[in-house]
Image (cartoon, helix red, strand yellow):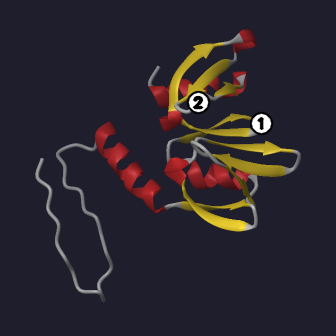
Amino acid sequence: MKISVEEINKELEEEILIRCHEVDDEIYEIVNKLKTEDQFVLGYQHDKVHRIKLSDIYYFEAVDGKVFSYCKDHVFEVKQKLYELEELSKNNNCFRASKSTILNIKKISSIYPSISGRFEAVLDNGERAVVSRQYVPVLKKMLGL
């Protein structure tokens, strides 16, 4: 695969062009990675506002009317509603895992069936998240099962 980089004038809009014989899963993954790198969520912690890359977020969770983003070592409060975050992140390897949770599929290290048709996902940071019965088909489709 040949990779080319061309510097352009500041007045021109930056652009990434992919030329391929066939648009396959690898191309979609590259495009999603490029899109994800540009997307940020604002997270609030101890009176500070942080820009958090969407790709660094393990999951979002709604608790007592507030929404939190969980990263490897930090938890941030997010001002958006869960449905807004779902829309923002749906093309970036994230999916609704339950009524109160959105998971980043790239941060899942393993999954296994749990009780009553649910699945349990073990994340790269060791945390566990439940995938509700109604969202298991979405997970399976994203994993290619």
In percent of the image, x 60 and y 55: which residue is there?
Answer: 88
Nearer the observer, 82 or 127: 127
Amino acid at dot 1 = Lys
Amino acid at dot 2 = Val
Left or right: 97 as drawn, with respect to 23: right
Residue 125 percent across, percent down from the top left: 56, 33
To which residue does mark 1 refer?
Answer: 99
| In the depicted structure, whether residue 84 falls above or below residue 49 | above
| In the depicted structure, whether residue 62 falls above or below residue 133 | below
In percent of the image, x 44 and y 24: which residue is there?
Answer: 144
In percent of the image, x 17 and y 66: which residue is there?
Answer: 5
User: Which sits earlier in the primary sequence, circle 1 or circle 2?
Assistant: 1
Q: Residue 41: which quarter of the image?
A: bottom right
Q: Residues within 10 Å of mark 1 (few under 14, many from 20)?
A: some
| In the depicted structure, whether residue 4 falls above or below residue 83 | below
Left or right: 102 as drawn, with respect to 62: left
Q: Residue 42: which quarter of the image?
A: bottom right
To which residue does mark 2 refer?
Answer: 138
In percent of the image, x 72 and y 57: which residue is there?
Answer: 78
Residue 7 percent across, percent down from the top left: 19, 76
